[in-house]
Amino acid sequence: MEGLLIPVVAAFISITATLVHGTPPSAGSFPTSGSPSGPCPPPNFGNLTSLNLAAYISAPWYVQKMIPLDYQPVDEAYCVRAEYTLLDPRNVSGGLIVYNSANKGGVNGPSVGTSKNGSLGGSRLIAVPTTFKAKGRDGKLLVGPELLQQLLPGDAWRAAFGPYWIVAVGYSQNISLRYEWAIISGGPPTFTSPSGDGCSSVPYSTTPAAVPRAATAGGWPSTRGGDGASGGGGGGNPFGQLASVDKGGLWFFTRKTEDPGSLARMEVRAKALGLDTSRMIPVQQRGCLYP
Ligand SMILES: *[C@@H]1O[C@H](CO)[C@@H](O)[C@H](O)[C@H]1NC(C)=O
Ligand SMILES: *[C@@H]1O[C@H](CO)[C@@H](O)[C@H](O)[C@H]1NC(C)=O
Ligand SMILES: *[C@@H]1O[C@H](CO)[C@@H](O)[C@H](O)[C@H]1NC(C)=O
Ligand SMILES: *[C@@H]1O[C@H](CO)[C@@H](O)[C@H](O)[C@H]1NC(C)=O
């Protein structure tokens, strides 16, 4: 359990910072010239009303593309997979246990992410519908360590958790799967691309790991120190570390490990939603041995 102390302390520091400084600064909504997407966040963004969360979590998801982040850097864009189970099997509103996995350095490289049982230094990573009563039908969840939810008074954990918004889904021929692909945004895309590419929930100034060319250049150094033991899935981020206060992100999920057709549809849909996809990098899934 001692390994837990540092991340929890870090999380408290981040929460304190949030409390002191109020909600994290965002660019807010302002009209842009030259941006095809208009204001950020776009009107109606995140407007799902009938997502079936039980069907959504009925099978694992494989990440096809993502924006690299401090806690999910370019050298961990291998075999990225997300799996969810209900905390209370009878109650979708009760939230999910999150099992994230990825490899570092290459396909089937060292594992990073929450362990098979969802443990993060002893605390499970969970995702709860933002509005309990909504059963997740709006696709809006908050992700963070269960321990933080238990330790913090009242609703304070909400500020420490990261937003996970399912903003678009493609339907599957398979009725039990229901969904074939999904676009996930780390909350509303409040930041406007300086080059007119649309809106993003990931700031343009503060994420060195999010330089898109790094992927093609290769060998981008990890901005995250240590190994899987120092973090790997946690507070404030759908995939992130406890210490991080970054809350944005963008992921393209598919049911199949590789699915170019769905990927093409997501590219089109994301742009139609006003999202800037230019900083996303491909995730390698070919040849992966999943946990
Ligand atoms: C959400 O908003 C988009 C863009 O305005 C629109 O095309 C879509 O029909 C809306 N979906 C729902 C469920 O309201
Ligand atoms: C389901 O979970 C929610 C959130 O924890 C809770 O408010 C609600 O009472 C639960 N419902 C049942 C039937 O247990
Ligand atoms: C979760 O897995 C870890 C090792 O991966 C183990 O130490 C721990 O006891 C497990 N927890 C539960 C609840 O199974
Ligand atoms: C539908 O998906 C489920 C879960 O992955 C799978 O077990 C089943 O075989 C699929 N059915 C068809 C007809 O492909």
Image: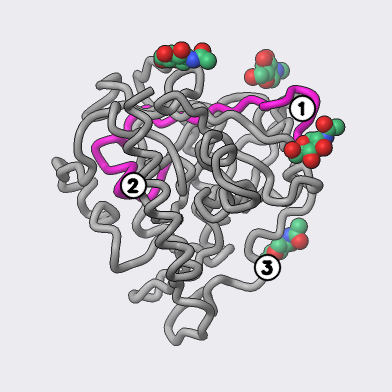
Q: Quadrant of residue 278?
A: bottom left
Residue at figure coordinates x 55%, y 52% from the top left: 163
Asked if the stretch drawn in magenta spans residue 193, the answer is no
Query: Residue 85's x, y, as percent?
Result: 63, 25
**Which residue is labeled 3 in the image?**
44
- Among the two numbered marks 2 and 1 on one chain, the one whose residue lies closer to the N terminus: 1
- Segment tinted magenta in the rendering: 65-93
Location of the N terminus by quadrant is top left
**Which residue is labeled 2 in the image?**
281
Residue at figure coordinates x 48%, y 28% from the top left: 123
Tag 2, which secondary structure?
strand
124 to 51, vertically: above or below: above
Check residue 175 in the rendering and tell me which mark sits there, or answer none: 1
Is the distance from the Cβ of mark 3 to the nearest ligand 1 atom less than 8 Å? yes
Label pair 2/1, CB-CB below 8 angstroms: no
Comparing 251 with 96, the one in front is 96
Label 2 to label 1: alpha-carbon separation: 30 Å
Comparing 148 with 267, the one in front is 148
Identify residue type, mark 1. Answer: Ile
Tag 1, which secondary structure?
loop
Label pair 3/1, CB-CB below 8 angstroms: no
- Mark 1 neighbour class, 10 Å CA radius: few under 14, some 14 to 19, many 20 or more: few
- Mark 2 neighbour class, 10 Å CA radius: few under 14, some 14 to 19, many 20 or more: many
Is the distance from the Cβ of mark 1 to the nearest ligand 4 atom less than 8 Å? yes
Residue at figure coordinates x 51%, y 85% from the top left: 31
